[in-house]
Image: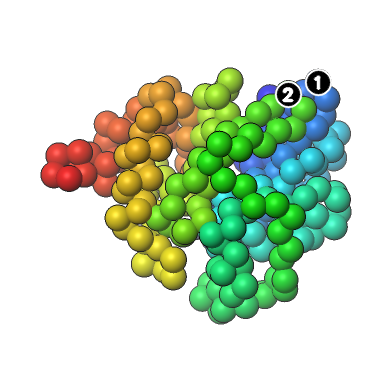
Amino acid sequence: MIHEILAVGPLQCNCSIIGDEATREAMVIDPGDDIEDVLAIIRKHDLEVKQIVITHAHIDHVGGAMKLRVATGAPILLNQNDYALLKMLDVQATWVGMADPGDVKIDHSVSSGEIISAGSLNASVLHTPGHTEGSICLFFPSEKKLIAGDTLFAGSIGRTDLPGGSLQKIMRSLHTTILALPDDTIVVPGHGHLTTIGDERESNPFLVKADRFG
Ligand SMILES: [Zn+2]
């Protein structure tokens, strides 16, 4: 599996470019910004983008999606519970000082139980509400790799104080869905460095604390 991670935009969102080495088919997850750099990686590996997947509709994750869709023709996938957030990208732009990317058109809503494929690569969709209502994670079982969006970070969890956020829901998502994954699962968070489920189970203060008191 080809997997390049590029920190894009002013908030340095981790954009993943994941490709099948044999068929060169690929998916791009969270193309928040810097689409020219994303396209350079796609060209470098001679990839054909089949899917554009958005973990949640915050501007730093979705801002470049339409530009990438125009360049590649690939559909954009997002869970429908984030469509309301998507309609306020102009407001979000003022929160973070980014330019308003304009309307983003979603081709399909995706939710738990669905498989997103590119070549022989298959990712299971895990609906993990809490950071936003429509937050999803992507789990690649054969590689034991989780693209976590802003649900889980190394040593922290996603904020829940923005519209659509819920601390109760993110804790439920983490405990029932994310911590059910194997300890040796590599976690690629929406921001910051990589970690594993085992390391987070062991030392993430939000998860350890909830285990002890919750
Ligand atoms: Zn976010």
Q: Is residue 134 left or right of residue 46?
A: left
- Give the quadrant of residue 208: top left
Disc 1 marks a residue whose amino acid type is: Ala
Left or right of 62? Residue 69 is right
Vertical position of residue 91 compared to residue 127: above or below? below
Q: Position of residue 6 (x, y in %)?
A: 64, 45
Q: Examine the rendering and report whether any part of residue 8 can be seen.
A: no
Colouring mode (rainbow / by chain / secondary structure / one colour): rainbow
Label 1 SS: loop
Residue beneath the point at 86% across and 34% down: 46
Mark 1 closeness class: few <14, some 14–19, many ≥20 residues within 10 Å:
few
At a point 27% along the width and 41% down the height, the residue shown is 207
Quarter of the image containing the C terminus? top left
Whether residues under marks 2 and 1 lie with C-beta atoms below 8 angstroms apart, the answer is: yes
Residue 76's spot in the image, x, y percent?
A: 72, 52
What's the residue at 31%, 57% (across, down)? 167
Q: Position of residue 194 (x, y in %)?
A: 48, 37
Instruction: Identify which residue, 145 or 127, lies in the foreground.
Output: 127
State which mark lies toward you, 2 or 1. 2
Write down the residue under mark 1.
22
Q: Which residue is mark 2?
A: 120
